[in-house]
Amino acid sequence: MLKNKSVPVGNLLVAWCLGFFLFGTPANVHAKLHIVSTTTDLAAIAEEVGRNLVEVNFICRGYQDPHYVDPKPSFMRLMNQADLLLYHGLDLEGTWLPQIIEGSRNRKVRFGQMGNLDMSLGIDPILEIPQGIVDRSMGDIHPFGNPHYSMDPVNGMTLADSMAERLSILDPDNEKTYHANAEDFKSRVASKLKEWHEKLHDFEGTRIVTYHRSWSYFFHRFGLKYLGNIEIRPGILPSPRHLAELAVEMKRRKSDLILNANYYPPKWAELLAKKSGGRVAVLPVHIKGEPQVNTYIELIDYLVDQIAEKLSGSAGK
Ligand SMILES: [Zn+2]
């Protein structure tokens, strides 16, 4: 029961301090914006753009498959605290993100709100938009085009701009800082771009087999080509006949490199290598997919170096 009685001044001071800690911060201390991204790639770029003004968390670890994530309650609790959700869109997270948003009970990150940013909206062109009927019931997982656009460093720069724009709307006091941070990130990526092109220049036109079409934007940027994919279509497992046909084609075109993203089981790639005489390279496709890959530039550096090394001596054009 509440009692109305006089309170000593010392107690009032304690109560004021307690209230201060519980309910507010002084106007000159900036409360960090909480960003939750679906992947480590978006998280790393958000760190670059937001720096000390933001706190960034991600859902899918760099060595996990972002097409399939278990929408755990811990992710809903994380999302409950978010001011901004960043995701790839194009249905990459279509099987799990809506459940996390719903379970978070956070209005700010619902579709259509300012705290919900589909990063694909700034990407041009979107590659591999299906022309025919896409049958998701059969497991087809790229119904609106290829969502793996962050593997093209030019798209990485676009992502930084889109984030700076949205952060400036959510936190207009720091608009200049967000844009300056994005410019700084972009200039560092741009200065590496020439080096990356030079390292892969000799391999332009080389045909490579990959498990999934994770590499389309990377190949598009650096002039590499698919010979084929181990999956029949994105998300659809290979048949023995498909692998046999692919092996024949690899021999015919003298294409011997098979890239397997490190979250896909290597068994089909190994089987194909055996049939075709090719070799398998297991590589990360997201930041933190390997311990030494912790920033966006480190990811592209790593992929360029690895692919250039694997293709040295390869005749697969
Ligand atoms: Zn995919």
Image (spheres, rainbow, N blue to C red):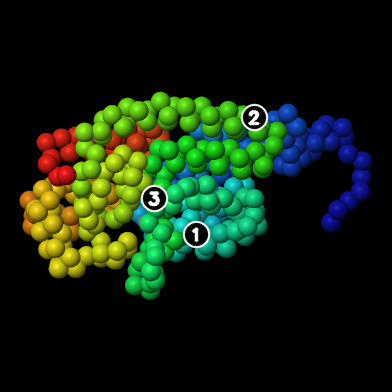
Q: Which residue is mark 3?
A: 148
Label 2 CB, ligand 1: below 8 Å? no
- Secondary structure under badge 3? loop
| Amino acid bearing label 3 | His
Q: Does the closest atom of ligand 1 sit within 8 Å of the Cβ of label 3?
A: yes
Q: Is residue 267 above or below residue 218?
A: below
Question: Which mark is drawn over residue 9?
Answer: none
Give the image quadrant in which the ligand numbered 1 is located. bottom left
Q: Residue at 92% of width from left, 48% of height from top? A: 4
**Category of crowding for the residue at label 1, using alpha-carbon neighbours closer than 10 angstroms: few (below 14), some (14–19), many (at least 20):** many
Give the residue type that dot 1 points to. Answer: Leu
Q: Is residue 4 left or right of residue 233?
A: right
Residue 303 position in % (x across, y down): 29, 38
Can the viewer see residue 17 in this picture? yes
Quadrant for the N terminus in the image: bottom right
Nearest the eye: 238 or 146: 146
Q: Mark 2 or mark 3: which comes first in sequence? A: 3
**Residue at (35% x, 54% y) in the render:** 65
Cα gap from disc 1 to disc 2, whole angstroms: 31 Å
The quarter of the rendered structure image containing the C terminus is: top left
Foreground: 4 or 145?
A: 145
At horizontal 25% and vertical 47% (from top left) the residue drawn is 225
Give the Cα distance between marks 1 and 3: 16 Å
Please, what secondary structure does the residue beneath circle 2 have? helix
> Disc 2 residue type?
Lys
> 266 above or below 155?
below
**Mark 1: which secondary structure?**
helix
Residue that mark 1 sits on:
97
Q: Nearer the viewer, residue 203 or 55?
A: 203
- Residue 226 % position (x, y): 25, 51
Q: Residues within 10 Å of mark 3 (few under 14, many from 20)?
A: many
